[in-house]
Image: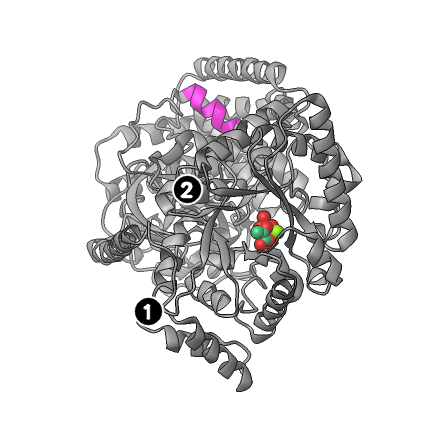
Amino acid sequence: MDGQTGTDSRKLLGRLRDVMADDAAGQQRLDQITQLIADEMHTEVCSIYLFRDEETLELCATQGLNAEAVHQTRMRMGEGLVGRVARTGEVINTDDAPATKGFRYMPETGEEAYSSFLGVPIQRLGEKLGVLVAQSRQARLYSEEEIYAIEVVAMVLAEMTELGAFIGEGAAMSARHQQPVLFRGGTGQEGASQGHVWLHEPRVVVTNPIADDPDREMERLNDAVEELRVGVDRMLSSAATGDKEQLEVLEAYRMFANSKGWMRRMEEDISRGLSAEAAVEKEQSAARARMVQVNDAYLRERLHDLDDLSNRLLRILTGQGGETGAEMPPDPILVARNIGPAELLDYGRKLKGIVLEEGSVGSHAAIVARALAIPLVIHADRVTTEALNGDLVLVDGDQGIVHLRPDETVVAAFRDKMAMQAQAQERYVSIRDKPAETLCGTTISLTMNAGLMADLPSLVSSGADGVGLFRTELQFLIRSHMPKRAELSEQYSRVMDAAGDKRVVFRTLDIGSDKVLPYMTATDEPNPAMGWRAIRVGLDKPGVLRMQLQALIRGANGRSLSIMFPFVAQREEFQAARAEMEKALERERILGHPIPETLEVGAMLETPSLAFAPHRFYQDVDFLSIGGNDLKQFFFAADRENERVRRRYDTLNVSFLSFLENIVARCDATRTPLSFCGEDAGRPVEAACFAAIGLRALSMRPASIGPVKSILRRIDLVDLRAVIHEARDEGHQTVRPMVMKYLKGKL
Ligand code: PEP
Ligand code: MG
C-alpha cells in the first residue's frame, strides 16, 4: 500500500475478474472482493456499503470489521464519513478519521481501532449505488495510486451491481431494475396509458469492465475513436451551413474527439487493466459528476456534448445502440432524457406514452405530443437510469406521475382509471356529431387549436366545428431551416383541404418569447415574453410576414381566408399589419394569383391594453380571439412558464372574469365576433363559466372538445351566470367553489 509495496491495479483487477467469473452467490462474491482488496492493498479493513433505498446505506460485506455488523449497520445519506462520501460523491482520504468532520462512531463495527479512512463512491454514470471503504490502523494518507486503484475497483463494482451480480440477502443486495419505482414529474399532455418501456437511446451495458490484454484494448479504443472522428467529420460536412447551433455542437464533438487529454486519460485506464469501454465510461462518469456541479449553461451544454459523444463511442465499442436488435414492444412508452420534435414525429402515433427527464410544457416535443394526443410526463428525474427496455410502465399524464414496474395493486387501480377514461371517451364519441347546445338552448361553437399536419385527422375525430387557432409558428419551430414560401403555401392548402367547408383561422407567426427559431439569431432580452415577439417582429422586419401572407393567399387559392395577428397591443399595430395584408393582396393580384373569395382579418386579444382600446379598434377588426394564456399572465403579472407562479391565480378569479365580461360587452356593443383560444377554453369548468359570461366560441385542443361539449350540454347558462354573480356579490376571490357545487354530478 505504500511506495515500496505499491498497489498493482492490473493485478488487483485481474484477481477481481477471476472472482467475477466464479459462479459464487452474491454474498460470497462480495466477501471475496473485500478480502482481495484488503490483501492487494495491504490494508486491514475493506468494506462495501450499498444503498438499500434512496436514503439508507447498508454494510453488505467487510474484511476487518465485525462480521456480525454485516446487514445490520446502516446509515443515512450524509451520515458519518461513509454517508458523506455517498452524498457528495467525493473521495474522503484522511489519516485521522475520528477527527474528520462528519465522523460517527458505530460501536457494532469495531472500527474505533482504525485511524486512516479512504472512502470512494460506487456510482455508475451519476447513479449512486454505494461506498467502498478501506481503513487501516496506521495513521497515514492513502497515495494517489491507491486512490486510483480503489476508484477503479469501485467502478467495476458499480458495473457488476448494475448487472445484478450481487443479488443476495438484504434489501441492499436485491436486483436493481426490478423494484417498482414511482416518478413525480409534471404534466406535458393529459391522459393515462399503460405500456412497455422503449428507450429512445438504449443504455449501453458494459459486461467486460476488466481486460487482460491492454494492447488489444488500446487498439480497440483507437479504432473506435477513429470511427467516431470520421463519423463526426461526415456529419459536419453534411450539416446545413446555416444551422449554427448544429454546427456548434458538431464542432464541440470534434474538439472532444480530438482531445489529447481525454484520450490520454482513457489510455492510462486501459494500461491499468480496464477494458476500452470501461475506460470510456469512467470518463463519462467523471463528466456527469462535473455536470451536476456546473452552473454555467454553456459549460453544461458542452459536458452534455461530451456525454453524447461517450455514448456514441460506447455504442461503437459494444455494438449496442439504436440497432441493438431489440424489438419495439407493441405498446411502446418512449423514455428519453429529451427528444426533438422531428424525432418524435418519426415515431408518430405508435407511441402509447412519453416520459422525459427534461422537457417543458412549452417545449416543441410537448407541442407534438399534444398534437398526437399522447400522454406525456416531463421532469421525471432519473427515469432513463432506472428504466430498462421492456419494463412495464404506467403513465399518468393528468397527475404527472409515472409508475415503473408497478406492483399488482397499482396496476389494478390504474386499470380502473383507464376504464373510466375509456367510458368517458365513449360518451364523447356518442355526442361527437351533436351540437354543443346548453339546456337553455344556446349553442357554443367549439373549434380546435392546431399547428401541425399531424393535427389534421383530429378535425374529424373530435367533431370540431373548424380550426379556431392555427399556430403557424409550429411549422417553423420543428425545422432546422426556414421553410420556403412554396412549402408553406402547399401546407396551408393541405390544411384547408382537410377542413373542407369548416373555417380555419391562421395566426401569423408568433415567434420570440418561448418560441425561439433554431435558425434565427436569438436576441438576448431581459424579459422575452414582453419583448420583441409576434407582430412586433413582423412589423419591424416585415420580410417573413410578407412571405407568409403571400403563402397564405396562395394556399387559399381563391377560397375564403381568415387571418389573425398575434400579440397586438394597440390599434396602430393592427392597422399596420392589415396594411401589409392589403399590400400582399395587391401584389398577388398583379402577379395573377387568385384572390380569396372572402377575407377576414382579426387580432388576438392577449394584452390587457386591447380591452381598453378605442371603440374604433373594435370596429376595425373583423373578429377578436382572446389568447388567455398570454392575457392571464399579463393580467396577474404571473409568468406562464414559471412553475412557481403559473397556477397561483385562478382563471375563475372574480377580477379576471369581470375583465373578460367587460371584453364580451365591448364586442357585443360593436358586434365584433369574439372567441377564446387559450388553454383554459379546453377545461370543462372554465369553459362553462366562459359560456355563462357570454362567450359563444371556444377553441381548444382536439382532445378537450368531447369533455367540454359534454358539460355544456348538461348546464343552464342562466343558472350558472346567477351562481357566478352570487359568488362575486358575496365577495369571494374566486367563483370556483360555488361553481363546482353547481356543476356537481354534471362533470
Ligand atoms: C394564448 O396566448 O392564449 C395563445 C393561444 O397563444 P400562445 O399560447 O400560442 O401564446
Ligand atoms: Mg399567446
State yes or no: residue 316 in magenta.
yes
Is 132 positioned to the left or the right of 620 in the image? left
Measure the C-alpha gap from mark 1 to mark 2: 26 Å
Q: Position of residue 224 (x, y in %)?
A: 49, 16
Q: Residue at x 56, y 59 (%)?
A: 643
Residue highlighted by disc 2: 459
Considering every residue shown, the one lying at the far bottom of the view is 730
- Residue 360 seen anywhere in this rendered image of the structure: yes
Q: Residues within 10 Å of mark 1 (few under 14, many from 20)?
A: few
Q: Residue at x 57, y 28 (%)?
A: 557
What are the residue bounds of the magenta stretch? Answer: 309-317
State yes or no: residue 45 in magenta.
no
Q: Position of residue 452 (x, y in %)?
A: 50, 36
Residue highlighted by disc 1: 746
Q: Position of residue 678 (x, y in %)?
A: 54, 55
Q: Quadrant of residue 424?
A: bottom left
- The residue nearer to you, when weighing 574 against 418, is 574
Q: Residue at x 54, y 15 (%)?
A: 231
Q: Quadrant of the C terminus?
A: bottom left
- For the residue marked with disc 2, what is the amino acid? Leu
